[in-house]
Amino acid sequence: MSSIADAWAREELADLGRRGLLRTLEPLASPQGPVVRIGGQSLVNFSSNDYLGLAADPRVARAFVAGLERWGVGAGASRLVVGDTEAHRRLETRLAAFDGTEAALIFNGGYPANLGLVQALVGRGDLVVSDALNHASLVDGCRLSRAEVAVVPHADVEAVARALARDGFRRRLVVTDAVFSMDGDPAPLGPLSEVCARAGAALLVDEAHATGVLGARGSGLCEATGVRPDVRMGTLGKALGGFGAYAATTRAVADLLVNRARSVVFSTTLPPALCEALVVAIDVLETDPELRPRLWRNIRRFVDGLCRLGFAAEQRSAIVPVILGTPERAVRASAFLRERGLLVKPIRPPTVPEGTSRLRFALSAAHTEAHVDRALQALEEARAHGLVPS
């Protein structure tokens, strides 16, 4: 079947292919875990954001099954219609306690969370200041809010202060990732918080890649730095192993989001059974004494190994990039590692800036020392073949 849209699609796909930016789906033939199967091949998985291995944790899975038996598969509606259940309330109460806030509100993912949060907090006549390397969800949330958007250089606190000093705005909001998803570096939250306080601006922090990884209890970079932003967006679909996201904030802000965040108002909410499982995931995160230490042992082992091999790397988060430059180099290096039993997806524009295509390694508590050493050995071989720089 042909159509006008089909012709458009073929033209665009051909252009992506010529530029080395074409992406395709690859179905897993096994559950998420440190080793997955794709097309009959077993691969050590360094591309998943399941930082604590909770996606396949039997304690969490049992809670999900029990939730299915009680609640069934879906919620049936948005929270404001008939989708609000005791399970949703239990999860939000648990999340607020986890983050030490008055309230929490769940969303159907980090992307809809950031769309809804920014759009609910600011609008025409307001200003949003956004880091140049913020996640696409924050970028799109800023655009959809209809506020004026000032994009500042990455981690440049002085540029944020200059943007906030401009007159003529009703409200001012600063939005930033906590851990930047492609580089793994932390935002300067302490200085940002001070600048916001001086300017009377609100601060929204996206903790998607910090939740479960950073902080004494694992609630994220805000906990680790002692910063209490106006709104903290945390993920349920990465270190907690499930799906969805949440905003931790005051009761009044949460109530406003119920009324104004379009991604809450107009979306069928998370399945109650999943909410039950996520309560257990938080319990496991807080009480399992080995989980996060094991993750950080793997991070240190990998980063130390990279440094011994002459690569530039830092122990900042579970994300460790190896920058290669062009999309073609990233694709070739990824294929080389796959031949050696490793799944490390190439990351290319527009996900990252031009000239910074890379292999993005995501470490997990589920990895063994042998998995980490295998990745280091493969990178050493890739460098010997001229596929990755020193």
Image (cartoon, rainbow, N blue to C red):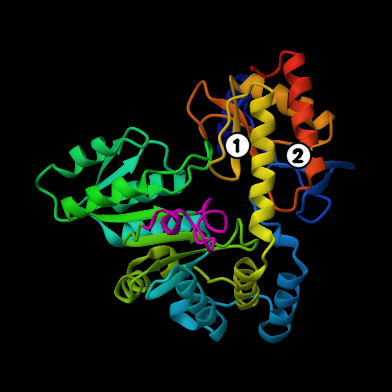
Q: Quadrant of residue 309?
A: top right
Q: Regarding mark 2 in the picture, which secondary structure is present there? A: helix
Q: Position of residue 241 (x, y in %)?
A: 65, 61
Q: Is residue 374 above or below residue 256?
A: above
Question: Which residue occupies the foreground of this view, 139 or 2?
Answer: 139
Q: Can you tell which mark lies on residue 51?
A: none
Amino acid on which disc 1 is placed? Val
Q: Position of residue 233 (x, y in %)?
A: 44, 59
Q: Which residues are magenta?
A: 208-226
Assess whether residue 214 is covered by the magenta stretch: yes
CA distance separating discs 2 and 1: 12 Å
Q: Residue at x 36, y 48 (%)?
A: 189
Quadrant (top left/top right/bottom left/bottom right) for the C terminus: top right
Q: Earlier in the sequence, mark 2 or mark 1?
A: 1
Q: Which residue is mark 1?
A: 320
Q: Position of residue 94 (x, y in %)?
A: 52, 76
Q: Which residue is mark 2?
A: 372
Outermost residue on the right side: it is 40
Q: Residue at x 52, y 52 (%)?
A: 210
Badge 2: residue crowd in 10 Å (few <14, some 14–19, many ≥20): many
Q: Are marks 2 and 1 in contact (CB under 8 Å)?
A: no
Question: Which residue occupies the foreground of this view, 61 or 141?
Answer: 61
27 horizontally vs 8: left or right = right
Assess whether residue 216 is covered by the magenta stretch: yes
Question: Which residue occupies the foreground of this view, 81 or 63?
Answer: 63
Amino acid on which disc 2 is placed? Val
> Chief secondary structure of the magenta span?
loop
